Image (tube, rainbow, N blue to C red):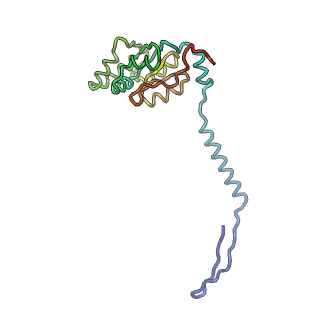
Amino acid sequence: MVYLYAYKIGNSVINLGKFVVKKHQFQQQKKMMNIKAKLKAANQLKKKFRPEHFNELFFRHNTALGPPYHIICDTNFFYYARRAKKDIFREMTRILLSKCYLYVTDCIIAEAERLGRKYKSMLRSMKDPRIRRLKCQHKGTYADDCLCARVEAHRIYLVATCDRDLKKRLRKIPGVPIVFVQAHRFTVERLPEAYGAPKF
């Protein structure tokens, strides 16, 4: 720190020079220790869970995830598909280049029924006889938990959803492809390479 000293005589100011005060060394060491402690605490918070296996290895050894594909559809996926005026069966066959089986669970149907008359046409499309229905053994009707638990137990399903929170949860599970509607088009995320294709 620098202090300036001056003495005033009448209207004139006489500069007497400056005096430099140095900080003590132990104060600097204490400050550095505080900074290191804060950085260490911040690094501990940044530690994240890392899966033991990479998704690519899972796709390569998971022979169950192949055509014909089994797709569980969420409530909002039917809503956005109808909004984009797309036929779900035709579009799924087009993007996956294979036969597909669509599924809905009991809790997904219950969630759609609670939305009211406004979504009656969407509920009618969900009850299409071509869409198979999976029975739920759990209590409650929260569809997101049901989908995540079913996908973790049986790694043969693709999940069709447009829910951002659900997609974040599904990305933490290795080897689960996600189908969603974006810009009025169906898109597949994290789908493995063509099943049975030659490796070069």
- List the single residue furthest toward the left: 117
Point out residue 112 in the picture as x, y percentages from the top left corner. Answer: 34, 22
Q: Measured along the vertical axis of the image, is residue 5 above or below residue 89?
A: below
* Picture quarter with the N terminus: bottom right
Residue drawn at 63 percent across, 46 percent down: 38
Number of disc labels:
0
Point out residue 162 in the picture as x, y percentages from the top left corner. Answer: 42, 28
Residue drawn at 48 percent across, 22 percent down: 148
* Picture quarter with the C terminus: top right
Q: Which residue is more in the foreground, 37 or 158?
A: 158
Q: Measured along the vertical axis of the image, is residue 61 above or below residue 84?
A: above
Q: Which residue is more in the foreground, 99 or 145?
A: 99
Point out residue 3 in the picture as x, y percentages from the top left corner. Answer: 65, 72
Point out residue 42 in the picture as x, y percentages from the top left corner. Answer: 61, 43
- List the single residue furthest toward the right: 25
Q: Which residue is more in the foreground, 125 or 86?
A: 86
Quadrant of the image occupied by residue 14:
bottom right
Q: Measured along the vertical axis of the image, is residue 10 above or below residue 174?
A: below
Residue drawn at 34 percent across, 11 percent down: 129
Q: Which residue is more in the foreground, 176 or 40?
A: 176
Quadrant of the image occupied by residue 85:
top left
Q: Measured along the vertical axis of the image, is residue 130 above or below residue 146?
A: above
Quadrant of the image occupied by residue 29:
bottom right
Answer with left or right where residue 95 lies relative to residue 126.
Answer: right
